[in-house]
Image (tube, grey):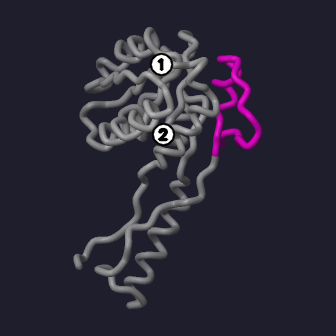
Amino acid sequence: GSNISGTSDLAPLDQQAALLQELFPETEYPNVGLLYCSAEPNSIFQVETIQGYLEDMGYTCSTYAFTDVNDLSSVTQSACDSSDVIYIPTDNTAANNTETIANVVIPAGVPVVAGESGICSGCGVATLSIDYYELGQITGEMAARILTGEEDVSEMAIEYDTTLTKLYNPDNCEALGITPPDGYEPIA
């Protein structure tokens, strides 16, 4: 055993691929651009993983990596020029620069499916996101069990938030003429 445990905020990538397919079927939107920051290993992992799921569903995927905010607009424009829909994973640089991304994708008419709700609220049309508040609750409960001696950290499995919600961005959906199907909640 080791003395490491905790929670993970890894998005359910297989389910996010299914959400993308539900909204943008491969027969109508065959080309998916995967937009991410190449300086973030977590983003690289997510892009490589979801690319496999999407290609298995029949999509053609192309990757568009930006190195930092300085080339974000130009790389986003390249993604728009060659993609029917864009997927952005949970990515800190993208999350901090959603306005820059929105200023390219909305005028280009290219929808973004986001890896998490923060990116979706800025530049996306939909996401299947974990709830970071819920993840914090789970983490706190784990810490309490350790501190009270109820559990030994070396025997605790990593825990995940399983309360996933399909969210959509009403403003961006309206701007792009997209009506999400039943079962999607407007992003707060």
* Quarter occupied by the C terminus: top right
Q: Position of residue 56 (x, y in %)?
A: 45, 34
Mark 1, other Cα within 10 Å: few <14 / some 14–19 / many ≥20 = many
Residue placed at 29% from the left, 80% from the top? 154
For label 1, the residue is 31
Q: Is residue 86 above or below residue 118?
A: above
Q: Secondary structure at mark 2?
A: loop
Of the residues under marks 2 and 1, which one precedes in the sequence? 1
Residue 100 location, quadrant: top left
Q: Which mark is residue 115?
A: 2
Q: Amino acid at mark 2?
A: Gly
Asked whether, in this view, residue 173 is left or right of residue 9, the answer is right
Residue 69 location, quadrant: top left
Q: Position of residue 95 (x, y in %)?
A: 43, 35
Residue placed at 48% from the left, 18% from the top? 31
Residue 107 location, quadrant: top right
Q: CA distance from mark 2 to mark 1?
A: 18 Å
Residue placed at 41% from the left, 64% from the top? 7
* Quarter occupied by the N terminus: bottom left
Task: Give 56 or 88, whichever is nearer the viewer.
Answer: 56
Q: Amino acid at mark 1?
A: Asn
Q: Position of residue 136 (x, y in %)?
A: 48, 63
Looking at the rendering, the stretch of residues picked out in magenta corresponds to 166-188
Q: Position of residue 109 (x, y in %)?
A: 58, 13
